[in-house]
Amino acid sequence: MKREVEQRIETAKAQAVRQRNYRRARDRALARLGNDYPNVYRTYLEEEMEADEDMGKKWLDITGRTRVVNSRS
């Protein structure tokens, strides 16, 4: 039983490391795309922000403050 628990913990740790590495690579790729195509990136970002706000989701600005979202019924 103890060995099974240890194996699960090790598997979870390995999965967490893989996920973290994937996120880092994805974030670096998005940064590169944003630098290479800033206007397209801003356009897509604005579209996603509007879609999220339409669903009532909040966005954080660079200081960590949330943008005011008016509920649209």
Image (cartoon, rainbow, N blue to C red):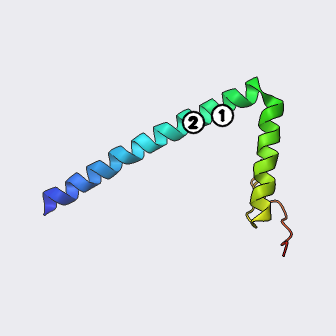
Q: Secondary structure at mark 2?
A: helix
Tell me: residue 44, above or below residue 9: above
Q: Give the percent coordinates (x, y) of residue 14.
A: 34, 44
Specify whether 43 is left or right of 29: right
For the point 81% across and 38% down, the residue is: 42
- Residue 20 horizontal side relative to residue 8, left or right: right
User: Is the C-beta separation of discs 2 and 1 under 8 Å?
Assistant: yes
Taking depth in this image into account, of 8 and 62 the one nearest to the observer is 8
Comparing 16 with 41, the one in front is: 41
Residue lying at the far bottom in this picture: please name it.
Answer: 73
Q: Which residue is mark 2?
A: 26
Kindly identify the residue that appears in the image at 82 percent across and 40 percent down. 43
Mark 2 to mark 1 CA distance (whole Å):
6 Å
Residue extending furthest top? 36
Residue 57 visible in rendering: yes
Q: Is residue 63 visible?
A: no
Return the residue at label 1: 30
Residue 15 x %, y %: 37, 46
Tag 1: residue type?
Leu
Label 2 Cα neighbours within 10 Å, binned few <14 / some 14-19 / many ≥20: few
Quadrant containing the N terminus in the rendered view: bottom left
Q: Is residue 16 above or below residue 24?
A: below
Q: Is residue 5 above or below residue 62?
A: below
- Number of numbered discs present? 2
The answer to which quarter of the image holds residue 52 is bottom right
Q: Residue at x 77, y 44 (%)?
A: 45
Residue 59 falls in which quadrant of the image? Answer: bottom right
Which type of secondary structure does the marked residue at label 1 adopt?
helix
Q: Is residue 34 above or below residue 64?
A: above
* Residue 73 location (% of width, % of height): 84, 76
